[in-house]
Amino acid sequence: MPELTPLEEALKAVMESVKPLGTERVFIYDAVGRFLAEDITSDTDKPLFDNSAMDGFAVRHEDIEGADEDNAVQLRLVGEYSAGTGEEIRVERGTAVKIFTGAPIPEGADTVVPVEYTETKDGYVYIKKEFKRGANVRKRGEEVKEGEVVLKRGHEIRGYEVGMLAFVNRAVVEVYRRPRVAVLSTGDELLEVGEPQSRPSQIRSSNHHMIYSLVESAGGVPHQLGIAPDDPEELRRVLRTCRDYDIFITTGGVSMGERDYVQYLVKEVGVDVKFHKLRIKPAKPVLFGTYGENRLFFGLPGNPVSCAIAFDLIVYPAIRAMLGAKEVFKKKVKAVLTKDYVRRDAKRREFARAKVWFENGKFFCEPHQKQRSHMLTSLVEANAYLVVYEGVKELKKGEEVEAVLLQ
Ligand code: AMP
Ligand code: MG
């Protein structure tokens, strides 16, 4: 039997082959889920001017010294500042301006007294509490100064970052390009969704749709190539298009069967194969190689669960790295196992479908009943993979285990 490649070695080969893609300028909404290829600096001081943090009265601190409930200070009201105001009033000694949150602090004033500590009557405001000089004033530049970096190159754009980009007057931003990923299922038995069944031996293909969506969720741009038969001529024709993509993914036809042609044909189209069999369970038949300039070829297994696991463990990190992400792997947690997990053969590292949840300060992990690699039910009812390391035959209830989260 040919040597099986350990997962770490396989990942090393994949990650060494990943080179960052070029960059492109996109509208900020289209930058979500992607990574900055430039430093973003602030266009102005933020805030741009001293402004009020409260609804209240802008005063001179010297006027309100010693003010309290029994000893209210009387100030003459000379105007009103709302957010966005164009008013220009000077607060002289003995006067105050009514002010709203976000409005600029009028000249002469240095402190804002919140409305709760005041009373107004006949054109006067009565201040019933002393506040420190500068209280309730947001100072110009206290958050960031003009030209200061607010988002570093490599930072992931989420909704919060879109807010920040708009705040510093950016509608367009430079991000890393998303990899173009071709997805192809292979197999004479496969039926497309909606296609009528003409022979009982045909099965509905799930893989190319599953992988398409997983690619998209990971941040890649999937291209659906559909289903190819187990026919060398047809397969060769489709595989030759690999140069149009950064990543080419096939499913099926990569195992030991006589009609498993992918492993031979990829060499014909110029793929330099780095490994073909992994020491993991399920998903042993996984082929990986490089072609062209920094392009990646993944031949994933036909069994849907194996296909998904191979994607999550091997392809997902490659897509994330191409996007410019620093953390490229699915997150792992330590969890308490809720029932025994036993297996006969401990040669390979196993990824058992499981449910993980958080309760009373701990994660718990329950392996799914159905663990066979053709059963998609185990995946749709799971949110994690329980990791059973090489050499481990049994994991006991109550033991601390490792789980890979599927999100
Ligand atoms: P293969 O690796 O081509 O020998 O396929 C292994 C198993 O996965 C077989 O039972 C196939 O019928 C099944 N299979 C292959 N491709 C798909 C697919 N696209 N969707 C669902 N099952 C598949
Ligand atoms: Mg097949």
Image (cartoon, rainbow, N blue to C red):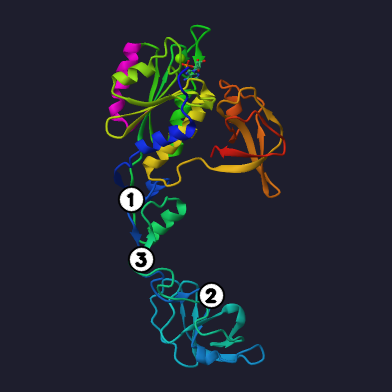
Q: Residues within 10 Å of mark 1 (few under 14, many from 20)?
A: many
Describe the element under mark 3 as helix, strand or loop.
loop
The reply to whether the magenta stretch includes residue 16 is no
Q: Are marks 1 and 2 in contact (CB under 8 Å)?
A: no
Vertical order, 152 against 95 (above or below): above
- Is any part of residue 328 visible from this angle? yes
Q: Which mark is residue 327?
A: none
Task: Identify which residue is drawn at 61% across, 81% down.
Answer: 117
* Label 1 – label 3 distance at C-alpha: 17 Å
Disc 1 residue type?
A: Ala
Task: Identify which residue is drawn at 43% across, 87% down.
Answer: 108
Circle 2 residue: 55
Residue interval drawn in magenta: 232-248
Whichever of callouts 1 and 3 sits on the residue coming sooner in the sequence is: 1
Q: Where is residue 30 drawn, in percent x and y?
A: 38, 46
Q: Are marks 1 and 3 in contact (CB under 8 Å)?
A: no
- Is any part of residue 214 visible from this angle? no
Disc 2 residue type?
A: Asp
Circle 1 residue: 37
